[in-house]
Amino acid sequence: MNVIAVLGTQELLIVGIVILVMFGGSQIPKLARNLGRAQRELQKGLAEGQADVDGDTDT
């Protein structure tokens, strides 16, 4: 189940305010950039793992 679908607008607003207070306005872009990089690395690793699995089944 998708977690975002369970949360309503008010809950997302509260989460956003908490993140803003915890990290500060200047740190949020850095945090988002690092999360994007981590997601890209994860997808790249998953694709490489899938390619290895697909290559192993051919032999």
Image (cartoon, rainbow, N blue to C red):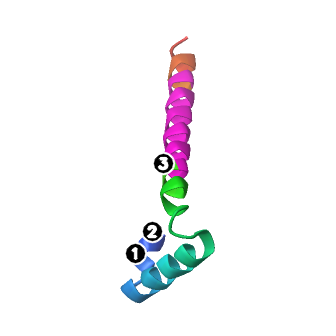
**Which residue is disc 2 drawn over?**
2
Element type at marker 2?
A: loop
Depth check: give the residue in front, 5 or 14: 14
| 54 within the magenta span | no
Q: What whole-number distance in Å separates the C-alpha atoms at marks 2 and 3?
A: 19 Å
**Segment tinted magenta in the rendering:** 34-52
The answer for how far apart the CA atoms under marks 2 and 1 are is 5 Å
| Dot 2 or dot 3, earlier in sequence | 2
Circle number at residue 5: 1
Of callouts 3 and 1, which one flags the residue occurring earlier in the amino acid sequence?
1
Q: Is residue 51 magenta?
A: yes
Taking depth in this image into account, of 29 and 35 the one nearest to the observer is 29
Q: Quadrant of residue 45?
A: top right
Q: Looking at the picture, how far across and down is residue 59, in whole percent?
A: 55, 11
Task: Name the spot of residue 11 as percent of width and height, x first.
Answer: 46, 85
Q: Is residue 37 above or below residue 49?
A: below
Kind of residue indicated by mark 3 = Gly
Dot 3 falls on a residue whose secondary structure is helix
Q: Please, what secondary structure does the residue beneath circle 1 have?
A: helix
Measuring 56% from the left and 22% from the top, which residue is drawn there? Answer: 52
Residue 54, given in percent of the width and then of the height, sits at: 50, 23
The picture quadrant where one finds residue 38 is top right
Farthest residue toward the bottom?
A: 10
Q: Callout 2, which amino acid?
A: Asn
- Taken as a whole, is the magenta stretch helix, strand or loop? helix
